[in-house]
Image (cartoon, grey):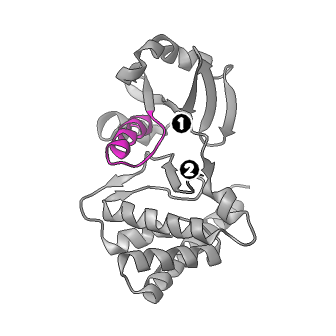
């Protein structure tokens, strides 16, 4: 078992190493689907522990020999984001467990954030908060300008809170698929924007503000993003129908 612990949290070392044995029966489950996310408290410190779905045979080889595991990337990318001034829960540790010489299980541990998912504030409301949406558009635009691209920027993975003076701050989670490049292409940025939301009126507003911030043609940018969303939703529907047909 490989365990990497942030120097600032060395006192949690023994507890962290015990997580593979205690994870199933301990903690409070916050999310359970492909991955499982739990909250643990140890020595007065609240921790978020994410256990990733076990990789398939091909992924086990890839994560062992050619590419860092999801947990290792989550830990590394969180540090990169913080170094670049983008808020994300502080990475505490990650764990990799091998079976037969190949990675079979991995965990990522971080601090807790109490910020609110943007999905609740923007998608779930009939008339979304345009000030908040505009600030988000500027935030994502500046991320792209800075060469930072969240791999899955849906509005459950971007959180926010308002300071006492009204300033809006954003926090990124689930960042293990992020990309860091010195110069992101326009096409890659547009593809990334497609993943923000399926709510069309909100998406069009976000992309309009994004394009204005970047001094891009607004109509063309909106058109390209909406076309990308149409294609994405069509491909998803085709995959769903195929699964329904052949996996019954």
Instruction: Name the residue located 44 percent from the left edge and 82 percent from the top edge.
Output: 221
Reading the chain from its start, which is encountered first: label 2 or label 1?
Answer: 1
Instruction: Name the residue located 49 percent from the left edge and 18 percent from the top edge.
Output: 16
The image quarter containing residue 39 is top right
As drawn, the residue found furthest toward the left would be 182
Label number found at residue 161: none
Task: Name the spot of residue 151 as percent of width and height, x first.
Answer: 44, 55
Q: Secondary structure at mark 2?
A: loop
Q: Secondary structure at mark 1?
A: loop
Front-lying residue, 159 or 61: 159
Kindly identify which residue carries mark 1.
52
Q: CA distance from mark 2 to mark 1?
A: 33 Å
The answer to whether residue 13 is left or right of residue 131 is: left
Task: Name the spot of residue 96 as percent of width and height, x first.
Answer: 43, 26
Seen in the picture, residue 131 relative to 65 is either above or below; the reply is below
Q: Which residues are magenta?
A: 69-90
Is most of the magenta stretch helix, strand or loop?
Answer: helix
Characterize the local packing of mark 2: few (<14), some (14-19) or many (20 or more) Cα atoms within 10 angstroms.
few
Front-lying residue, 111 or 189: 111
Kindly identify which residue carries mark 2.
163
């Amino acid at each position: 078992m490989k365990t990497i612990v942030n120097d600032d949290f060395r006192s949690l070392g023994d507890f962290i190493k015990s997580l593979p044995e205690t994870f199933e029966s301990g903690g409070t489950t916050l999310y359970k689907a492909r991955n499982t996310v739990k909250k643990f408290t140890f020595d007065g410190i609240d921790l978020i522990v994410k256990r990733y779905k076990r990789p398939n045979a091909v992924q086990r080889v890839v994560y062992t020999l050619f590419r860092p595991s999801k947990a290792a990337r989550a830990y590394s990318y969180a540090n990169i984001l913080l170094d670049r001034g983008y808020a994300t829960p502080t990475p505490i540790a990650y764990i990799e467990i091998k079976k037969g010489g190949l990675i079979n299980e991995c965990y990522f541990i971080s601090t807790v954030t109490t910020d609110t998912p943007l999905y609740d504030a923007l998608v779930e409301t009939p008339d979304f908060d345009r000030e908040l949406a505009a600030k988000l558009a500027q935030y994502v635009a500046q991320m792209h300008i800075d060469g930072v691209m969240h791999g899955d920027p849906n509005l459950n993975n971007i959180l926010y809170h308002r300071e006492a003076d009204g300033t809006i701050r954003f926090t990124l989670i689930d960042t293990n698929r992020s990309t860091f490049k010195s110069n992101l292409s326009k096409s890659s940025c547009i593809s990334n924007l497609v993943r923000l939301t399926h709510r069309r009126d909100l998406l069009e507003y976000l992309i309009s503000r994004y394009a204005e911030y970047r001094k891009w043609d607004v109509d063309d940018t909106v058109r390209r993003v909406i076309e990308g969303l149409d294609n994405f939703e069509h491909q998803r529907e085709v995959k769903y129908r195929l699964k329904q047909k052949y996996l019954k």
